[in-house]
Each structure stands twice: as C-alpha cells, then as structure tokens.
Amino acid sequence: MRTPTLAGLGMIGLGLTLLLIAILFPIIKQVECGFPSGVKITAALRNREDELRQAFATQKDDLGMSTHLLCDDPALATRLLEAAWSRAATGWRGPVVPDALRIYVLCVFVQMLNAHRRVVATNLLAVLGPQEKTAFVLHEFGGLTVAQIAELTQRPPVDISHSLGTAQVLLDRALQDGGPS
C-alpha cells in the first residue's frame, strides 16, 4: 500500500475544504474575523423564513389548484396544503428555489393525502360488524377467496358471501352519507 505524499494530502484537504464551503455557502450570510480571540465565523441564516414565505405566496394559487384537483374535498385540500407547506418549510434544507420547493411541497401533500385516505378507509370500516369487517378485510385487502375465508374463520361459505354483501352495502351507504357516523 502506498502512503500518501504531502502533496496528495494537501489536495485531499483542499477538496474537503471546497466541499465544506459548497455545503455551507448557501446558508452563510456573513463571516467575521476578529483578533484577539482568533478567527470568529458567524453563520447567520439569510432571512430564510421571508424567502420561504415569499416563495409560497407566489406559488399559492398554482399549488392550490393542483391540490384541489388531487383532493375532492376543497376544505381538506386547503388544510393539507397548509400542513404540507409547514412541513416543507421546516424540512427544506436547500436554497430557496421556487420550482424545487413547489415539487417538494406537492410530494409532501401527496404523502399526507395518501395517509389521510388510509385513515378514512380505516374509519369507514367502523360501520361494519366484526364478521363483515373480517370477511371484507380478508377478501379485499388480504386477497383471500370466499372458501379460504370460510376455512380460516370456520364459517360456511354462504355466510362469508352474505357478510361480504352486507359489508359492501354498509360501506356504500357510509360513503354516500359522507363517512362513518
């Protein structure tokens, strides 16, 4: 194995220094050098919150239109967009680039919307009794056949078919009424 030369170590050090500067440069507002206490570096965030607010203000209408098209409930879309923006503003680490930030907000929105849909689906199942819920979940989400569910639950296949039919009627009714009561 070769040992690095002094010039090689210098190049590695220079590369690491440039990498560190490239990472810190977007967030450093000022560098102060002070003597008697040595070199003092103060990293201050460039009014980042104002930049983020301004980026959101300029994109709010476009984001709103996109989120309302993705979500059928306008009030829910508005709430989720605000939550997605808040989460994006606290999680965004890069420079404030409007297009990249818009994409990030939409990704967060879609994740939050999908999570909300999973919760609603779970809550919708609350309208079902235990036998209907078991049959429905095993059939629709577990991919089991009526015969497999009958064997697993030790119930006749005709009872499983009846439970599935009842579950479908109850879920359809709950969806028409706007959710579980």
Image: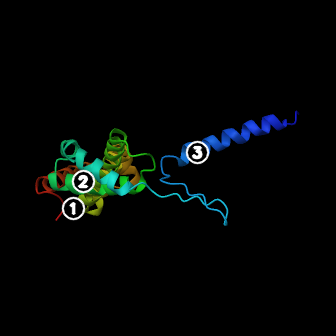
Lower position in the chain sequence, tag 1 or tag 3: 3
Left or right: 82 in relation to 49: left
**Quadrant for the C terminus in the image:** bottom left
The amino acid pointed to by label 3 is Ile
- Residue at the spot of label 3: 21
Res. 41 in view: yes
Q: Nearer the viewer, residue 29 or 179?
A: 29
Which label's residue is closer to the chain start, 3 or 2? 3
Q: What amino acid is found at the position of numbered circle 2 in the picture?
A: Ser
Q: Could you say which is closer to the camera, residue 74 or residue 58? A: 58
Residue ID for mark 2: 163
Percent position of residue 153, x then y: 38, 56
How far apart are the two marked residues, 1 and 3, measured between alpha carbons?
58 Å
Give the mark toward the camera: 1 or 3: 3
Question: Percent position (x, y) of residue 50?
Answer: 32, 55
Q: Residue at x 24, y 44 (%)?
A: 59
Q: Which mark is residue 127?
A: 1
Image quarter in which the N terminus is found = top right
Q: Residue at x 41, y 52 (%)?
A: 152
Please indicate whether residue 17 sits to the left or right of residue 49 in the image: right
Q: Rounded to the nearest whole Å, what is the CA distance between mark 2 and mark 1?
A: 13 Å
Please say whether residue 160 is visible from this viewpoint. no
Q: Residues within 10 Å of mark 1 (few under 14, many from 20)?
A: some
